[in-house]
Amino acid sequence: MNLPPFQGFIRGTVQVPGDKSISHRSILFGAMAKGKTTVEGFLLSEDCHRSIECVRKVGVQVDVDQTNVTIQSDGIESWQEPTEILYTGNSGTTTRLLAGILASSRIASVMIGDESIQKRPMKRVTDPLKQMGAEIIGRENSKFTPLAIQGKELSGIDYTMPVASAQVKSAILLAGLRAKGTTVVREQETSRDHTERMLTHFGVKIEEQDRVITLEGGQTLHPAHIVIPGDISSAAFWLVAAAIVPNSSLTLENVGLNSTRDGIIEVLTDMGATLDISKGQSASHEEIGTVTIQSSQLTGLEISGSLIPRLIDEIPIIALLATQAQGKTVIRDAEELKVKETNRIDAVVTELKKLGAKIESTKDGMIIEGPTPLTGGKITTYGDHRIGMMGAIASLISTDAILLDDADCIAVSYPTFFEDYKLVTTGS
Ligand SMILES: O=C(O)C1=C[C@@H](OP(=O)(O)O)[C@@H](O)[C@H](O)C1
Ligand SMILES: C=C(OP(=O)(O)O)C(=O)O
C-alpha cells in the first residue's frame, strides 16, 4: 500500500473499535459459563475471530451481529471434543488463555497457530500448567505449538511469575478455577488485569492485594452482559498522530482507561503533550473515558520498569513519537518485545532507521534521539499489525510516500484502521 505524504493536520472525533484483550475474554469466558452471555462493542478483528472459531469447535454457539455477540453454552463441563484442530492464527491471547482453559476441561484437543505463533514461547504457560497436573504435549518439550492437551482435574498452584504477562497470569487463573484447592499468582510487575475484572463480572470470587491474586478452585462462571470499551492500544496510534502532526486536535471517545493499560497517556503527558481526559461511568468493571489531544512541543524521556507492561503493545508507536521529541528517549526493561508477533525491537529500529530516524537497539529496548524529520520509504511489516500501523502513522509526517509491504496484517487488531485514517486526515 502506498501512503502519500500528508500536508494537513489531524482533526475530528474518533471511536476506536472494541478492546482486543477484553473481546477475547468475553468469548472464552462466555463459552465457559452455562447460559447466554451477551456482548456489546465486540472487536471484529482477525484475532478475535480465532477465539470465536475455537469455541465453536468445542460445541459453543456464537452469533455475531455487527459488534453485538451472543454466546450460548452448556458450560465448560459440556464442551465436546473437537474433531478438528483448533486454529489460533496470529493470536497469542487465544493460544495461551485457551491452553489454561483446555487443560482444566475434560476434553482432548490440539491447538496450532500461524507461522508467527509457532515461534512464540509457550513454556511460560505449559510449565505452570504442568505443575498443576496438566497433560500437555508440544513441540520441543512443550516449548512451542502445536500443543496437544488432554483436559483433567488439576490442583491449585502458588506461582510467582517470572515475566510480566497477563496471558500467563490468565492461563493459570483460568485453570485454577476448576482445580482442587487454592490458586495464587504473584506478580513482580502488574500486568493488565482484564481477566480478574471480567471474572468478577461473571460472578467469580477473586482477590487481589499487593500484586498477589488468589482464587478458590471449584467455581463456576455465571453468564453476563459485557460492554466493551474502545481499545486504548488502537487509540494510541491516533493520539500519537495528533501529538506529532502540527496544528492537530483530536477527540477519542469511549476509550478504555484501565490503569493497567494507560501507560501511553502517562508518556504523552510527561513528554509535554496537551491532553484532556474526562472519565465516564465504568462499564462491566472497566473504566472508560474521552481523551482530547492537541499537538505541542514534546521532550524525550525514560520509559522503564513498571510502566513497561502498561504500554507494552504501544512501544512501536511510542518509538515513532520519540523521533519527534526533543532530546533522548530511552526505553528499557522491554525484552518481552522480542517475543511478540515479531521481534519488535529489531523491527522498529530497522524500519524507523530506513526513514532517517536516529534510533539504536539495546539489549532490552531502544534509544531514540529527536527531533528528526522523516523521509519516505518502504516499510516491512513482518506480518505484524502494530508495525504496519506505525508505518502508516509515519506517513503523516514523512516528506515522501511510505510504502507498506503488507497492510492486510493490520486487520489482526484494527480492521477499520484505514477508515479512521481517512476520517482523521480529511475530516470525513
Ligand atoms: O492478555 C492479553 O490480552 C495480552 C497481554 C499482553 O501479552 P503478554 O501476556 O505476553 O505480556 C499483550 O502484549 C497482548 O497484546 C495481549
Ligand atoms: C502481542 C499482541 O497480541 P497477542 O499476544 O494476542 O498476539 C498484540 O496485539 O500486540
Image (cartoon, rainbow, N blue to C red):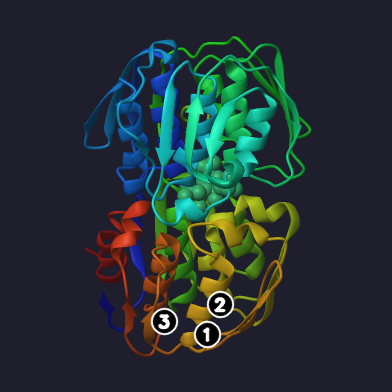
The image quadrant that residue 110 belongs to is top left
Which of the two discs, 3 and 1, sits closer to the camera? Answer: 1
The image shows residue 77, relative to residue 376, as above or below, that is above
The image shows residue 8, relative to residue 174, as above or below, that is below
The image shows residue 37, relative to residue 125, as above or below, that is above
Q: Is mark 3 on a helix, strand or loop?
A: loop
Point 61% across, 84% down: residue = 370
Amino acid type assigned to the residue bearing label 2 in the image:
Val
Residue where numbered disc 2 is placed: 349
Q: Is mark 2 on a helix, strand or loop?
A: helix
The image quadrant that residue 399 belongs to is bottom left
- Which mark, by number, is residue 171? none
Which of the two discs, 2 and 3, sits closer to the camera? Answer: 2
Disc 2 residue crowd, few under 14, some 14–19, many 20+, Cα 10 Å: many
Q: Which of marks 2 and 3 is nearer the N terminus?
A: 2
Amino acid type assigned to the residue bearing label 3 in the image:
Ile
Residue where numbered disc 3 is placed: 397
The image quadrant that residue 266 belongs to is bottom right
Q: Does the residue labelled 2 lie within 8 Å of ligand 2?
A: no
Q: Does the residue labelled 3 lie within 8 Å of ligand 2?
A: no
Q: What element carries label 1?
A: helix
Residue where numbered disc 1 is placed: 353
Report whether residue 288 is seen. Answer: no
Q: Where residue 136 sits: x, y (%)?
A: 55, 31
Amino acid type assigned to the residue bearing label 1 in the image:
Lys
Between the residue at mark 2 and the residue at mark 3, the CA separation in whole angstroms equals 18 Å
Between the residue at mark 3 and the residue at mark 1, the CA separation in whole angstroms equals 15 Å
Q: Is there CB contact under 8 Å for labels 1 and 2?
A: yes
Q: Where residue 270 sits: x, y (%)?
A: 66, 65
Q: In this view, does 239 lie to the left or right of 303?
A: left
